[in-house]
Amino acid sequence: MGTTPDPDFGPLHRKIDALCAAIGPAPTGRPTTTELEAEVTALRAALRGFIAAAKQRFHEKVDRTAGPDSCWLWTACVDGKGYGLLNVAGMSRRAHRLAYALANGHDAGDRLVCHTCANPRCVNPAHLFLGDNSDNMADMARKGRSGTAKMTANTVRSLRTMREAGDSLYTLARAFGINESNVSAITTRKTWRHVR
């Protein structure tokens, strides 16, 4: 009766399995295997419906208008660091981690889901990769985001895209670790003019 869980919904599958294991004898006797299988089938069908609805909710909150190679921006709630959030089964989950799980068929577990684009709102699976903290730090250094150098040509493009999408100076400043006057200078092209 085992099934392969949909990405990031393993806890729900485990709850169903626990419920199935906990089903004991009915007051009038032990339920038949057929009755148990029917109940499990009904539970799994309900779970599939829940998963489909969660996937639809996820995809409704993604702006893909920039094209398949560009950042796909999360348009809903974001946390203090600018990462998208979605409530799934009563838990707030980071949108880029859900995007990775949906695209790859498995949860990232304890590993980090890093962005090649350095845009925390991006959920384009082509921009996401698995890594650990040292991989993330090395990636940041390659992009010039370690130490005092916080912006690169790619992060400037991402910041401008996010500003055009309506993000406030305050939100962008927090997301990119710079101050609001720097965000304004970048988005009005007073600085980083050479980046298109």
Image (tube, rainbow, N blue to C red):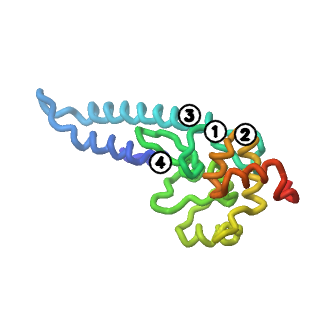
Q: Earlier in the sequence, mark 1 or mark 4?
A: 4
Q: Residues within 10 Å of mark 4 (few under 14, many from 20)?
A: many
Which residue is at the front of the view, 34 or 61?
A: 61
Which residue is at the front of the view, 127 or 32?
A: 127
- Measure how far apart labels 1 and 4 are at the Cα level: 21 Å
Q: Which residue is mark 3?
A: 57
Q: Nearer the viewer, mark 2 or mark 1?
A: 2
Q: Amino acid at mark 4?
A: Asp
Quadrant into which the C terminus falls: bottom right
**Are discs 1 and 4 less than 8 Å apart at CB?**
no
Secondary structure of the residue carrying numbered label 1:
loop
Image spot of residue 188 (x, y percent): 82, 48
Q: Residues within 10 Å of mark 3 (few under 14, many from 20)?
A: some
- Measure how far apart labels 2 and 1 are at the Cα level: 9 Å
Secondary structure of the residue carrying numbered label 3:
helix
Q: Which residue is mark 4?
A: 8
Residue occupying the point 24% across, 44% down: 21
Q: Earlier in the sequence, mark 3 or mark 4?
A: 4
**Are discs 3 and 2 less than 8 Å apart at CB?**
no
Q: Is residue 123 visible?
A: no
